[in-house]
Amino acid sequence: MFHLLLALPCLIVILRFLIPLAWPLWVTCVVSAALLLVSQHHLLTLFAFGSMFSPEVPRAVILVVNTLFGAMIFLALMQLVTDTITLLLALARRRKLYIAASLRYTLAVVAIGLAAFGVSQAARLPPLKEVEITLADLPEAFDGYEIIHLTDLHISRLFEAPWVERIVVKTNALAPDVILITGDLIDGALDARRDAVAPLQALTAPDGVYVSPGNHEYYFGYEEWMGHYQSQGMQILANQHAVIERDGTALVLAGVTDVSAEDDGYPAPDITQALEGAPDDATVILLDHQPRNAREAAAQGVDLQLSGHTHGGMMVGFDHIVARANNGFVSGLYDLGGMTLYVNNGTGLWPGFALRLGKPSELTRITLRRE
């Protein structure tokens, strides 16, 4: 069904854009075939590499395919709008109207331009985003505590070692107290990504680097990746917690498995288990890759939940659809009856849909404040 839905924009472009231009038949057929291949690039990746989440092709190919894919979607939407307006005008004037070829070509140029810009925004080094979060019961010793929140790096053939190195350098230069990563660090098996993830071992903070798993970790050998993260100096929080102490007070960092874990034969997310043995009345920060269960975390006394997964919705408009799939959470801060949820737009994103318009990636510095 997913692949059939992606074919719809392609059919719209062929039927309502290409054919009315009256190009030579062979040109129309060649362009139509190319668009069909682009619309099904996820399926082709699945057949070629065994997973549609990890296209093992040069970075330039990923950028070009995503640009063409985005242009096709934008052109289909603009063509539908143009057709609707033309139909309404024709009904109002009671005569047949035609869409000029010059207008069609203009729409195509705009669609390609939008897609190229969207891909460039998706593939860039994310800008720093400053977020200040006030917590009612935060111990005074942690007032001003600085967290770097990374998520959805999706290290892949799109985000390779040089990009990862720049993320690490930028993160370390900010000198945070702790670095928290909420899953989906990779797209690909360990053997294919070993060199690309190597720069992560240089991440450093006084209180450590902590990782909770995302759904993509389960696609590519969960146990291997968790062990590799640990070998690079990162502490795994999968239904577990760690305690940071200052001046006799405590801050609890808890993390849960992804909601998809049980489908892959691994323990489901369990906040109760994650907090078992934690100091009473300590401020609790929860790392949960997907934000959909945030209300359950709030009910269990979590003070701050950090999540990713949504990529911020990637594009203005599309974010409303993504929010519906995540219980209304898609980007930014939410107040859930005493618990604060922060949904990060993502440091990177999945290379199968590398487009951002109005929903920028982010390298996030969170400063905690005592109310």
Image (cartoon, grey):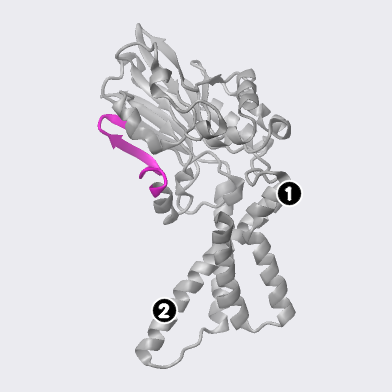
Q: Which numbered tag is attached to residue 48?
A: 1
Give me the C-alpha separation between circle 2 and circle 1: 42 Å
Residue 157 placement, left or right of 238: right
In the image, residue 116 sits, relative to residue 279, either above or below, namely below
Q: Secondary structure at mark 1?
A: helix
As for residue 337 lying within the magenta part, the answer is yes
Residue 352 placement, left or right of 92: right
**Residue 131 seen by the camera:** yes
Q: Position of residue 96 (x, y in %)?
A: 45, 91
Q: Which span is picked out in magenta?
A: 324-340
Q: Residue at x 64, y 18 (%)?
A: 231
Q: Position of residue 296 (x, y in %)?
A: 33, 31
Q: Position of residue 293 (x, y in %)?
A: 38, 35
In the image, residue 248 sits, relative to residue 324, either above or below, namely above
Q: Secondary structure at mark 2?
A: helix
Residue at the top extreme of this rendering: 248
Q: Nearer the viewer, mark 2 or mark 1?
A: 1
Q: Please name the amino acid that badge 2 sits on.
A: Ile
Which residue was labeled with disc 2?
85
Q: Which numbered tag is attached to residue 309?
A: none
In the image, residue 57 sits, relative to residue 93, either above or below, namely above
Q: Position of residue 217 (x, y in %)?
A: 58, 32
Q: Nearer the viewer, residue 297 or 122?
A: 297
Q: Residue at x 66, y 30 (%)?
A: 197
